Amino acid sequence: MQKNTSAQHQTALMQPLEPRLFLAAGSLDPSFAHRGIALLAGSDGNTDNISVARQQDGKLLVLAGPRPNFQYTTLTRYNTDGSRDRAFATDGRIVFDPAKVAAGNCLAVQNDGMILAATESGAQDGTLFRYTPRGKPDKTFGSNGVAATAPHRISAITFAPNRIILTRSIDGFQVERYFNSGKLDKTFAGGVVFTHFKNVSGYEGYCRAVTVQNDGRIIAGGHVNFHPALLRYTWDGKLQTIFSRPSSIGIVRRIFTLPDGKTLAAGWHVGGSDEDQYILARYLPNGALDKRYGVRGQVLTHIGGDSSGHLADNQYIDRLPDGKVAIVGGETLHGQSQDIVIARFNPDGTPDTTFGLNGSTQTDFLGLDTPKGVFATADGNIQIVLRSVRPRKSLLISARYDGD
């Protein structure tokens, strides 16, 4: 009798389990915005000239413009739900004077939350603006928040302790270093280092990416006559190493310094059949390809590729906290991106088959979809920003994918 009473008591303590949604890595994260998708309010989708940066708190900064019938460039901050952050600048947006700013180029956020926006004038001079986290001009930077005005647009920005390092789009590799105050750092070979390459077939070198190693050496990446190239400079500005480069056509678009001193470079590549592909390459500290990565040091993927002969230049990459990398590109047809594709790779360059279907996932956002950025969140999720062109309106969209 006692035994039956005990059994009945145990049964009474059992509660029905609440419904649970178990996500697979690569699925849209339903806890983010509306089922994983947020529409960024406003007109930023009306231009293809868009640069995006993500703050540590998850808010997005968008440098956009000019737009058709609206010849202004703007810097807007969005909350995680896609609404405009009205506490930023004036009603959430900075509108640049068109007499001084013709277009935006790139964005970067410092560890202290200061915001750097690189723009170009109608004369194609590049300028760096710095704003406080609340969107006010930082009067301690340069002249009333403006510095680094010089010929040619700024193509990339990175940071070192008390330093700002930038590159410019020019016939050669130009790297400049500034103090955090915006003053040119002349201990870096006078502040500006320009590496000229001999003209071959009418093309020269263009710098598109930059990073700083733990020892202070600077690695700049881009292309020389449309061959991917990486150059390394010492802290005082001397050219030290020209990294080995694959005998292929393409451009380096992003560089990462790895904890073990190696370098990961990413960009696009044109194969023998003129089909565009995305390429990852890992280099040893001496500049040689790391043969233990991918296939002989390289990984080729068709994410964002296009067999129509168009150069696929709308892919983005970020490195995840666990050393994996995420690439976002478009499923492209005749030069137009249709759907968004995300691929994830293991630290050794192999596809991460735990993500999506055999390492990638594809999403149709119901327009001609072009990626504008990808960001690794602190918890390992993947957030992307894309432009979706519809028949009546072009939208800017943020989406987040589960990483576990």
Image: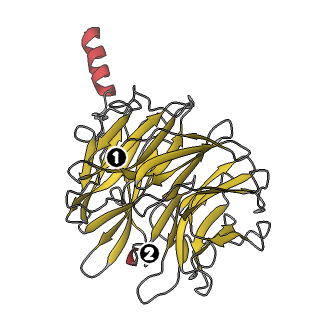
User: Which one is in front in this view, the residue at disc 2 or the one at disc 1?
Assistant: 1
Q: Is residue 311 visible?
A: yes
Q: Is residue 135 visible?
A: no
- The amino acid type, in three-letter code, at marker 2 is Asp
Label 2 belongs to which residue? Answer: 44
Say which residue appears at 23% left-offset and 54% top-offset.
274
Q: Position of residue 99 (x, y in %)?
A: 61, 87
Q: Position of residue 125 (x, y in %)?
A: 61, 75
Q: Position of residue 349 (x, y in %)?
A: 36, 33
Q: How far separated are the C-alphas under marks 2 and 1?
A: 35 Å
Q: Taking 105 as reference, is 280 above or below it?
A: above
Q: Taking 33 as reference, is 277 above or below it?
A: above
Identify the image quadrant of the C terminus.
top left
User: In the depicted view, which residue is nearer to us: 115 or 90?
Assistant: 115
Label 1 belongs to which residue? Answer: 248
- The amino acid type, in three-letter code, at marker 1 is Ser
Q: Quadrant of residue 390?
A: bottom left
